[in-house]
Amino acid sequence: MWRRRHCSSCDGIFTTLEQIDWPTSLLYKDNSSRVGPFERDILYISVYDSLKHRKKAVSEATALTATITAKLLPVIKDATIQREDTIRVATEVLRRFDKAAAIAYQAFHPL
Protein backbone atom coordinates (compact mmCIF):
# COMPACT_ATOMS: atom_id res chain seq x y z
CA MET A 1 0.00 0.00 0.00
CA TRP A 2 1.31 3.39 -0.99
CA ARG A 3 0.82 6.32 1.37
CA ARG A 4 1.61 10.01 1.11
CA ARG A 5 2.65 11.64 4.34
CA HIS A 6 3.00 15.30 5.14
CA CYS A 7 5.49 16.51 7.74
CA SER A 8 4.09 19.45 9.64
CA SER A 9 7.57 20.44 10.86
CA CYS A 10 9.40 20.77 7.56
CA ASP A 11 6.35 20.87 5.26
CA GLY A 12 7.83 17.97 3.27
CA ILE A 13 5.81 15.29 1.52
CA PHE A 14 6.99 11.69 1.72
CA THR A 15 5.80 8.55 -0.01
CA THR A 16 5.96 5.26 1.88
CA LEU A 17 5.33 1.71 0.76
CA GLU A 18 3.83 -0.68 3.26
CA GLN A 19 4.10 -4.40 2.62
CA ILE A 20 3.74 -7.68 4.46
CA ASP A 21 6.71 -8.95 6.43
CA TRP A 22 6.22 -12.53 5.24
CA PRO A 23 8.54 -14.45 7.61
CA THR A 24 7.14 -12.87 10.76
CA SER A 25 3.50 -12.84 9.63
CA LEU A 26 2.96 -16.27 8.13
CA LEU A 27 3.99 -19.84 8.70
CA TYR A 28 4.69 -22.52 6.10
CA LYS A 29 3.71 -26.14 6.68
CA ASP A 30 5.35 -28.81 4.51
CA ASN A 31 4.43 -32.45 3.84
CA SER A 32 6.10 -33.76 6.98
CA SER A 33 4.07 -31.30 9.10
CA ARG A 34 7.15 -29.20 9.86
CA VAL A 35 6.21 -25.59 10.40
CA GLY A 36 8.51 -22.64 9.79
CA PRO A 37 8.39 -19.06 8.57
CA PHE A 38 7.08 -18.46 5.05
CA GLU A 39 10.00 -17.31 2.93
CA ARG A 40 8.89 -15.36 -0.13
CA ASP A 41 12.46 -15.40 -1.43
CA ILE A 42 12.45 -19.20 -1.61
CA LEU A 43 9.26 -19.05 -3.68
CA TYR A 44 10.91 -16.45 -5.92
CA ILE A 45 13.97 -18.66 -6.48
CA SER A 46 11.75 -21.61 -7.42
CA VAL A 47 9.81 -19.50 -9.89
CA TYR A 48 13.01 -18.01 -11.29
CA ASP A 49 14.52 -21.48 -11.78
CA SER A 50 11.43 -22.44 -13.77
CA LEU A 51 11.80 -19.35 -15.98
CA LYS A 52 15.53 -19.54 -16.69
CA HIS A 53 14.85 -20.29 -20.35
CA ARG A 54 13.29 -16.83 -20.83
CA LYS A 55 15.19 -13.62 -21.59
CA LYS A 56 13.53 -11.53 -18.87
CA ALA A 57 13.47 -14.24 -16.21
CA VAL A 58 14.33 -11.95 -13.28
CA SER A 59 11.61 -9.36 -13.87
CA GLU A 60 9.05 -11.99 -14.85
CA ALA A 61 9.83 -14.08 -11.76
CA THR A 62 9.42 -10.98 -9.59
CA ALA A 63 6.00 -10.19 -11.07
CA LEU A 64 4.84 -13.81 -10.99
CA THR A 65 5.93 -14.22 -7.37
CA ALA A 66 3.85 -11.17 -6.46
CA THR A 67 0.88 -12.70 -8.28
CA ILE A 68 1.33 -16.05 -6.54
CA THR A 69 1.56 -14.50 -3.08
CA ALA A 70 -1.56 -12.41 -3.77
CA LYS A 71 -3.46 -15.54 -4.81
CA LEU A 72 -2.23 -17.38 -1.71
CA LEU A 73 -3.72 -14.84 0.71
CA PRO A 74 -7.33 -16.14 0.44
CA VAL A 75 -6.30 -19.77 1.14
CA ILE A 76 -4.37 -19.01 4.34
CA LYS A 77 -5.83 -20.67 7.43
CA ASP A 78 -4.63 -19.86 10.95
CA ALA A 79 -1.75 -17.78 9.53
CA THR A 80 -0.32 -20.93 7.90
CA ILE A 81 0.30 -21.60 4.22
CA GLN A 82 0.18 -25.26 3.22
CA ARG A 83 2.81 -26.60 0.82
CA GLU A 84 0.11 -28.10 -1.42
CA ASP A 85 -1.66 -24.75 -1.74
CA THR A 86 1.59 -23.03 -2.66
CA ILE A 87 2.41 -25.59 -5.34
CA ARG A 88 -1.14 -25.60 -6.73
CA VAL A 89 -1.33 -21.79 -6.99
CA ALA A 90 2.21 -21.43 -8.37
CA THR A 91 1.59 -24.10 -10.99
CA GLU A 92 -1.69 -22.48 -12.03
CA VAL A 93 -0.08 -19.03 -12.40
CA LEU A 94 2.92 -20.43 -14.27
CA ARG A 95 0.72 -22.52 -16.58
CA ARG A 96 -1.18 -19.41 -17.63
CA PHE A 97 2.09 -17.57 -18.26
CA ASP A 98 4.36 -20.26 -19.72
CA LYS A 99 3.51 -23.96 -19.92
CA ALA A 100 7.16 -25.02 -20.07
CA ALA A 101 7.83 -23.11 -16.84
CA ALA A 102 4.87 -24.81 -15.16
CA ILE A 103 6.19 -28.23 -16.17
CA ALA A 104 9.66 -27.35 -14.88
CA TYR A 105 8.17 -26.13 -11.59
CA GLN A 106 6.10 -29.31 -11.17
CA ALA A 107 9.14 -31.47 -11.86
CA PHE A 108 10.91 -30.05 -8.80
CA HIS A 109 7.80 -29.58 -6.66
CA PRO A 110 5.55 -32.62 -6.97
CA LEU A 111 2.34 -32.74 -4.99
Image (cartoon, grey):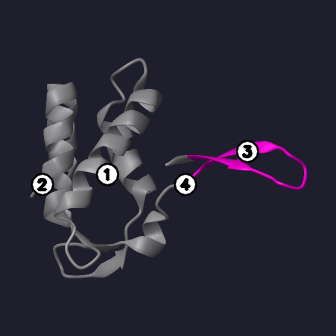
The residue tagged 3 is 14
Callouts 1 and 4 close, C-beta under 8 Å: no
Residue at 29% across, 75% down: 79
* Quadrant of the image occupied by residue 56: top left
Distance between the alpha carbons at the discs numbered 3 and 2: 45 Å
* Quadrant of the image occupied by residue 95: top left
Distance between the alpha carbons at the discs numbered 3 and 1: 27 Å
The residue tagged 4 is 18
- Region rendered in magenta: 3-18
- Which of discs 3 and 1 lies nearer the camera? The answer is 3
Residue at 39% across, 35% down: 63
Sequence-earlier tag: 3 or 2? 3
- In front of the other: 57 or 81: 81
Residue 91, position in %: x, y?
16, 43
- Which of discs 1 and 4 lies nearer the camera? The answer is 4
- Which of discs 1 and 2 lies nearer the camera? The answer is 1
**Neighbour class for label 2 at 10 Å: few (<14), some, many (≥20)?**
few
Amino acid on which disc 1 is placed: Thr
Amino acid on which disc 3 is placed: Phe
Amino acid on which disc 4 is placed: Glu
Amino acid on which disc 2 is placed: Pro
